[in-house]
Amino acid sequence: MAAKLTSRQEDYSKWYNELVVQADLAQHSDVKGCMIIKPYGYAIWEKMQSQLDKMFKETGHQNAYFPIFIPKSYMSKEAAHVEGFAKECAVVTHYRLKTAEDGSVVVDPDAKLEEELIIRPTSETIIWNTYRGWIQSYRDLPILINQWANVVRWEMRTRLFLRTAEFLWQEGHTAHATKEEAIAETKQMLDVYAEFAEKFMAMPVIKGTKTASERFAGADDTLCIEALMQDGKALQAGTSHFLGQNFAKAFDVKFTGKDGSIEHVWASSWGVSTRLMGALIMTHSDDQGLKLPPALAPIHVAIVPIYKGEEQLASIKERMDPLIAELKAAGLTVKFDDDDTKKPGWKFAEYELKGVPVRLAVGNRDLANNQIEIARRDTGEKRSISMDGACAEIQSVLDQIQDNLFNKAIEFRKESSRKVDSYDQFKVEIEKGGFLFAHWDGTPETEEKIKNDTKATIRCVPFDSDDEKGTCMVTGKPSAGRVVFARAY
């Protein structure tokens, strides 16, 4: 059995790191800053990927794939973009190794590339260079492309899932004939992310606009969803960018309109990554391990038979097989754990650690009474239910768990959100964590001062702001409305 986790109250960061490893989600790689996603962790990511992919296709998008290598010259064509990513880029300079006289492998100095290649930190440049050949007329628009891929951003301080040098993600890249279409696409995809986060991850989010200093490099506007983790820190869970005509102009992507006019294309890009795994863990889990919402759980129901000898096991299995078949027919994933090398107590703790939403325990006495014990991972509640109608009861419990996890996260966010009016009050409150709603004068200078003084950043200008005009808590200058501040991952 895995070692007991450090408690969240004692050391939240240590708790998170231990949980990721002990729950068999991921481990550090020998390559500094990179991670190995283990089968159980990858199964959760596949669930996320599958649902998001379905939602993308329902909104008219298609999947494609573009090279991992980007010529360095492409990165230079959009000044703000290269400036934003320059310090994070991994660069390939040679294309061959050779064996040295001492038998070691070295880079062949004669195999230097004529032009260095960047391992993609994001794909706007190579995709827009490609779109130039795809787009000539308004008839070629819109282009609605998504790519599932890995990217590399050379991070110095890494944490499994939250910040690694290489990570998995999807990136959407769309081209439109009008500014209005591109803006509508940007908003639509943020709504898709918000729906996924709340409906499937059971994680409430705030939708809003990033400030100019927090905007994606090369974008005219960046929209985001922000979530609050249990330690009171914010996590940016997804972004959608209105790119204007910046990349179209950089790569000379033009089209002929219906009226014969020629103009540059309008664009959007949007993405979420394996960072969502970290968000899922930190939103719901406790000191006993993961709590997974049923919508994303690799195993919905774990069944632990309690028996002595093969005859009792065979009897239990015979009675449980029809229920297992019924659960599977209902689309649920079931594990009947008859591993005789581990005791029931060990199995209970293991499924608790791995966040399996429902656990069933059944022994001979239960069978005699035509019942089974059901345990909920979210509340820890245990009770006996009748074998008759058990499938419907289990489905109902899973729905309750999904709703309960979301409601509990909503309640936590509500308790951890407050309005602040003075800078002195802000400095006190930010130490407690959570979302602080405060007035800001809209200047990058004030934003930078707050960040330097308190390590808090403006997470977003929320869409559902009540337009409450006021005065900036720092400068006293007019403010159009409150923005969301927090310390963040």
Image: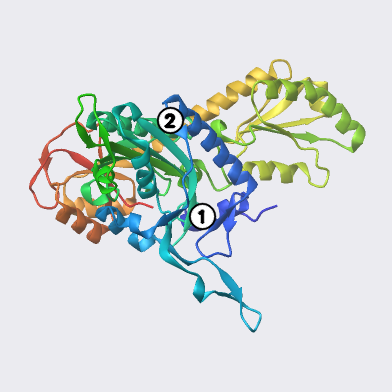
Relative to 210, residue 86 above or below: below
Residue identifier under label 1 = 160
Q: Find residue 231 and report its horizontal and vertical position in percent.
A: 41, 49
Query: Is disc 1 in contact with disc 2, using a CB cutoff of under 8 Å?
Result: no
- The quadrant holding residue 375 is top right
Q: Which mark is residue 275?
A: none
- At 77% from the left and 30% from the top, the residue drawn is 362
Relative to 62, residue 284 above or below: below
- At 32% from the left and 31% from the top, the residue drawn is 185
Q: Find residue 330 and report its horizontal and vertical position in percent.
A: 65, 21
- At 51% from the left and 70% from the top, the residue drawn is 111
Q: Which mark is residue 61?
A: 2
Q: Is residue 198 left or right of residue 364?
A: left
User: What's under tag 2, amino acid-wise?
Assistant: His
Q: Find residue 208 and report its horizontal and vertical position in percent.
A: 28, 37
Q: Secondary structure at mark 2?
A: loop
Q: Secondary structure at mark 1?
A: loop
Q: Which is more N-terminal, label 2 or label 1?
A: 2
